[in-house]
Image (cartoon, rainbow, N blue to C red):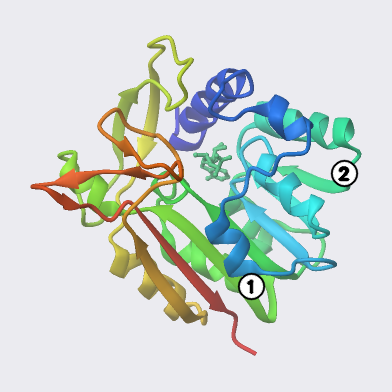
Amino acid sequence: MNEASLNQQAWDNRTRLHVKSDFYDVAGFLNGNSSLNPMELEALGDVNNQSLLHLQCHFGLDTLSWARLGANVTGIDLSPVAIEQAKQLAAQTNLNAAFICSDIYQYFDLKQRETKPELFDIIFTSYGVLCWLNDLDLWAQGISASLKPNGIFYLAEFHPMVDLLSGNDYFTTKQQIIEEPTYTENHNDEIDTLAVWSHSLSDVINALLAAGITIESFNEIPYSPYNVSADLTQDQQGRFFSHHQGKKVPLIYSIKGHNKS
Ligand SMILES: C[S@@+](CC[C@H](N)C(=O)[O-])C[C@H]1O[C@@H](n2cnc3c(N)ncnc32)[C@H](O)[C@@H]1O
């Protein structure tokens, strides 16, 4: 099985668990809660009437949360189970959203497209996305080619320092196969087999710069909005921290940039 099929199968399995998990709280979303965090909400500001492409949208909660704020959203994900679920949630909430089931590399591959690519005001991608991608140069080129001139790119991602402190690679590696249960509380020790790649911060930044994205801000944050590992401690604001030798570990980073004009 190739890496895309391996990861698709694993994300299909994971989606079936995730939609039932407390972690994703679909009931709360259906009651009107947003799944977005203050960090990305502040960074992107008013998205009303903006066209927004959400890469690796999983089953659409963040995509639809942007739609609730008035954005004209398109979500893309590899997993047909996730995209089907996203479409169902859009119908249940009466939100206007387009969901495309595709590997992002195929979506970006202009040679395979019959129609001219749609250009977006904003491309958003977040939390647990880069480790599934083998080629950041192609990723960044696809982002630049899908953004309008001066269009905004925003990434929030887990910091690769976390991987290093967990005994994994910091610097970019060739493909590795991992076997682990998912990160939601209802995983029941079900093991998924996945293909992953490490990417250093400089590789992410250099790929974006080389593709013509001007970086406006780069932030490293000592907390995660998500409880993704057993050793995290929670503060009164619900943020999760990790310490190494008594010092705070950078858990999240974000990059905001804009496309060439
Ligand atoms: C950790 S989830 C995204 C997290 C998202 N922030 C959330 O919690 O809803 C990663 C997503 O990337 C998708 N994915 C992985 N590789 C992909 C690829 N090559 N093209 C498109 N989607 C991909 C998976 O199907 C999965 O839904």
Q: Which residue is mark 2?
A: 95
Q: Which residue is mark 1?
A: 145
Res 175 quadrant in image: top left
Residue 173 in view (yes/no) = no
Locate the C terminus by quadrant.
Answer: bottom right
Res 29 quadrant in image: top right
Badge 2: residue crowd in 10 Å (few <14, some 14–19, many ≥20): some
Q: Residue at x 37, y 11 (%)?
A: 189
Describe the element under mark 2 as helix, strand or loop. loop
Q: Residue flagged by tag 1: what amino acid is it?
A: Ala
Locate the N terminus by quadrant.
Answer: top left
Residue 38 in view (yes/no) = yes
> Which of the four quarters of the rendered structure image does ligand 1 lie in?
top right
Q: Residue furthest bottom?
A: 261
> Residue 211, how many percent across, how many down?
49, 77
Q: CA distance from mark 1 to mark 2?
A: 27 Å
Q: Residue furthest left?
A: 245
Res 8 quadrant in image: top right
Report the mark closest to the observer, 1 or 2: 2
Q: Is residue 77 left or right of residue 179?
A: right
Q: Residue at x 53, y 60 (%)?
A: 39
Q: Quick check: 47 above or below 192?
A: below
> Residue 224, how many percent across, how many down?
40, 47
